[in-house]
C-alpha cells in the first residue's frame, strides 16, 4: 500500500489530552484549528530548502484569539524531535526531506506569527507526559506582559490646548502630553 493512500486523522490523542488539561485547569477562550492569515506579501515568497512554497496562513492546534497566543502540539515523529525521532529504514531520503521541510515550516510559522504580534508556544508530544510543566508554559504565555492591554478608560491631560492620549512606542504604555 502506498503512503499517499493513507489519510491522516489528525493527532486526536494528543489534542484530546490537551483539551482535558485546559478544561481541568479552567482555561477558557481557546479555539481549535482557527486559520490565522499573515496578510504580508513578503511571506508569500518564502520557500523551503527543497523549493516548496510556504503558505501565508497557519492553523495552530489551539489559539487564544483575544490574547493572541498560538499553541502547537507537535508530534515527535513528524517534527523531528531530537529525543524521540527515529528515521525510518525505508525511503530514507524522502523522510529526511519531509521532516526537514516540517521543521523549516515550523520556524517560518513561528517567526511570521511573532512578527504579527502573536505569542507562540510549541509543545512536543513527549512533553505531554509532564502535565504540570506544560500547563506552566501555557499559563505563562497567557499571563505574559505582552498580552496585557492598556485600560479602556480615557486618559486625562492637564493641557488647556488639547487632551490626547499618545502611545509611546519606546515605553510601551499610554502616556499623556
Image (cartoon, helix red, strand yellow):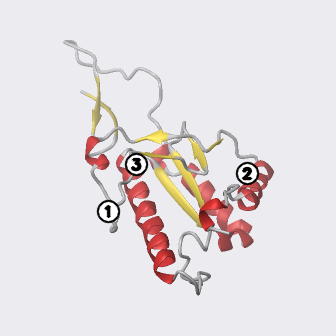
| Residue in the foreground of this view, choosing between 85 and 7 | 7
* Badge 3: residue crowd in 10 Å (few <14, some 14–19, many ≥20): some
57 left or right of 53? right
Residue at (59, 81) in percent of width and height: 85
Give the quadrant of residue 109.
bottom left
User: Which mark is on residue 55?
Assistant: 3
Q: Is residue 55 above or below residue 127?
A: above
Residue 143 seen anywhere in this rendered image of the structure: no
Residue at (56, 83) in percent of width and height: 87
SS assignment at label 3 = loop
**Furthest residue to the left?**
161
**Of callouts 2 and 3, which one flags the residue occurring earlier in the amino acid sequence?**
2
Which residue in the protein does label 1 denote? Answer: 51
| Residue in the foreground of this view, choosing between 137 and 169 | 137
Q: Is residue 41 above or below residue 45?
A: above
72 left or right of 159? right
Which residue in the protein does label 2 denote? Answer: 22
Q: CA distance from mark 2 to mark 3?
A: 29 Å
Q: Position of residue 30 (x, y in %)?
A: 64, 42
**Of callouts 1 and 2, which one flags the residue occurring earlier in the amino acid sequence?**
2
* Badge 1: residue crowd in 10 Å (few <14, some 14–19, many ≥20): few
* Badge 2: residue crowd in 10 Å (few <14, some 14–19, many ≥20): some
Quadrant assignment for the C terminus = top left
Q: Position of residue 17 (x, y in %)?
A: 76, 59
Q: Is residue 126 above or below residue 156?
A: below
SS assignment at label 1 = loop
Residue at (43, 61) in percent of width and height: 105
Choose mark 3 or mark 1, whichever is in front. Answer: 1
Residue at (47, 25) in percent of width and height: 152
Q: Position of residue 12 (x, y in %)?
A: 74, 56
Amino acid at each position: 500500500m502506498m503512503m499517499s493512500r493513507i489519510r491522516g486523522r489528525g493527532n486526536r490523542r494528543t489534542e484530546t489530552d490537551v483539551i482535558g488539561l485546559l478544561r481541568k485547569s479552567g482555561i477558557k477562550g481557546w479555539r481549535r484549528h482557527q486559520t490565522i492569515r499573515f496578510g504580508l506579501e513578503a511571506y508569500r515568497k518564502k520557500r523551503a530548502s527543497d523549493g516548496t512554497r510556504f503558505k501565508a496562513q497557519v492553523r495552530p492546534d489551539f489559539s487564544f484569539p483575544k490574547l493572541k497566543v498560538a499553541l502547537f502540539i507537535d508530534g515527535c515523529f513528524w517534527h523531528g524531535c531530537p529525543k524521540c525521532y527515529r528515521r525510518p529504514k525505508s525511503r530514507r531520503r524522502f523522510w529526511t526531506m519531509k521532516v526537514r521541510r516540517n521543521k523549516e515550516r515550523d520556524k517560518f510559522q513561528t517567526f511570521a506569527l511573532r512578527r504579527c504580534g502573536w505569542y507562540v508556544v510549541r509543545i512536543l508530544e513527549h512533553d505531554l507526559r509532564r502535565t504540570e510543566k506544560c500547563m506552566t508554559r501555557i499559563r505563562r504565555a497567557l499571563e505574559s506582559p505582552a498580552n496585557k492591554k492598556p485600560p479602556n478608560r480615557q486618559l486625562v491631560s492637564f493641557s488647556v490646548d488639547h487632551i490626547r492620549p499618545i502611545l509611546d512606542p519606546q515605553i510601551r504604555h499610554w502616556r499623556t502630553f
